[in-house]
Amino acid sequence: MNDGTVRLTVAQAIVRYLANQFIEIDGEEMRLCGGGFGIFGHGNVTCLGEALYEHRDALPLYRGQNEQSMGFAAAGYAKQWLRQRFMFCTASAGPGTANLLTAAALAHANRLPILMLCGDVFLTRLPDPVLQQLEHYGNPAMGLNDAFKPVSRYWDRITHPAQIIQTLPAAIATMLDPADCGPAFLGLPQDVQGWAYDYPVELFDKKLHRIRRQAPDAREIADAAALIASASAPVIIAGGGVQYSRAVKELTAFAESRQIPVIETIAGRANLLNDHPLNIGPVGVTGSDSANTIAAKADVIIAIGTRLQDFTTGSWTAFDKAARIVSINAARHDAAKHLSLPVVGDAKLAIRALDAALGRYHAPTGWTTLAQAERMDWDKYVEGNVAHGNRPSSYAQAIGVVNALCDSRDRVVTASGGLPAEVTANWRTRDIGTVDVEFGFSCMGYEIAGGWGARIAQMEREPDKDTIVLVGDGAYLLMNSDIYSSVLTNKKLIVLVLDNGGFAVINKLQNNTGNESFNNLIADCPTVAEPFAVDFEAHAASMGAIAETVANPAELGEAFMRAKASSKTHVIVMKVDAYEGWTTQGHTWWEVGTPEVSDSPKVTAAHHDWESARSRQRKGV
């Protein structure tokens, strides 16, 4: 060190910089980066690996089993920390990095911060073509890492050591920005990683970050208040952004003071407790009759912290065409959707400002009473749906068992397939922010990996609570190796494997659109020579977990209590019916492509039936 500089390699500088970034959360300072997940190869082991070894205490590195699942784990960690902290993923050049593409897309769709530090080919090109290099004959600068541009909020390839002086602050600023939050990707050529540079020492000074709260424009608040004040049937759609803004108290107080019913998106599923009198239930394709009835009758919709995905809007059939939308969102892109009256800004600040601007307004008593009556009817349906007895076992019954026996602060994690719909409809929220249903990208394989990442984060604040993973047999077979990861790292998971013999929910969609069962359930795959049941218990046990198989929901309850008492990852396997026991109520129309012409009368009839609902679809106005 001399003249205020320190000589470091690019890799050393990146790691040292990350180790000195901190964030203030609830008055407590903690390291912004919780560590990372890594699989080493020739593209990252010699230089980045050397740097990470020197900081292994400050930035713990978890050895991954699959790069895609590492990215899912980082996403689960970021969700658990409400986007206030992140983890990095490092992969080698070539297929290791390519495996991260799906995880980057998941983080991008869900607006989640993960940092990807990925190997790249040699900048000098002297040894080209190198192992795992893609060669584009007319564009030698194009490589695999360019594929991350569409699925990254921030993308850069480090071509000179000085670059990171600008790049690292920009990447972190993106990951912490409420409007632009998402994955950041840094391509690290193998030679550049090891190049040294005299960096200014102040680059590595301790930096304390705080999440920005953007105040809404006063004129937008005034316009929104005027519209809401004219409403005779207002409803609030509460999305995941309410939790990311830490605005649950403000949402609750606003709804209570104005007596406005609240309906929840999938990402906002745990904004209000189940028994709150203004919680009218989940809305949309995987929603409830109660919420969807109220959504259809509302004249003003106050959307808070939601990107209004098709599963929320029923492909824009869930609302009356004449209904007006006020959209409160930190992201301008989301606030302006479908000609909404936008309020661009932080949810906590916007709710407070809107409340102050509304004067003495509150929703008509008859409207709120109607919404609450609808919710009571839905509660009766759910109670019967999750009950078990003399009928085939179902997802809903398993959900009911776990819901009744878990601690209120336990976290439930699921994704893809039929479980998101069943959890969204049937889970009765016992505490705020305890549900992670990954449906932004609807990504199979997230369940166990995301659960592992969530568990790492959970143990940093609530080590006495559990992370409960619900996964179908199809998603389990796709990605299960982080059961092993959880055992290796002593990050206990409770994993319920619900086996319905294949991809049953897509088989259901196939049948509902008039098609014959084909290539979804194992029994309906024409290329399967000899169907047989996987021994999931033995498979999970081979990765070091405690594992058992139960025959019915009653046995599931007993096994779940054994899992709760255990200090080790515990996997419980139960068969569920592929055809019976699905939640049949609460669904809105959902646009899927159906064949306009077909030799099958059933397919043709289903197409006409599906298209008949299109008349209710809003056309962007």
Image (spheres, grey):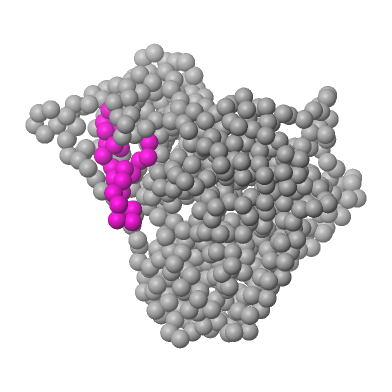
Looking at this rendering, what residue extends furthest in the top direction? 127
Residue closer to the observer: 595 or 494: 494
Q: Is residue 115 above or below residue 584?
A: above
Location of residue 364 in the rendering, given as x and y in whole percent from the top left corner: 58, 84
Indicate yes or no whether the magenta region holds residue 488: no
What is the magenta range?
A: 10-35
Residue closer to the observer: 295 or 472: 472
Could you tell me which residue is drawn at 81 percent across and 48 percent down?
Answer: 392
Could you tell me which residue is drawn at 46 percent across and 31 percent down?
Answer: 489
Location of residue 219 in the rendering, given as x and y in whole percent from the top left corner: 38, 75
Location of residue 243 in the rendering, given as x and y in whole percent from the top left corner: 46, 58
How many labels sit on residues? 0
Q: Can residue 478 be seen in this view?
A: no
Left or right of 451? Residue 372 is right
Q: In this view, does 487 lie above or below 457?
A: above
Assign the N terminus to one quadrant of the image: top left
Indicate yes or no whether the magenta region holds residue 21: yes
Could you say which quadrant of the image residue 608 lies in?
bottom right
Could you tell me which residue is drawn at 52 percent across and 37 percent down?
Answer: 567
Left or right of 510? Residue 1 is left
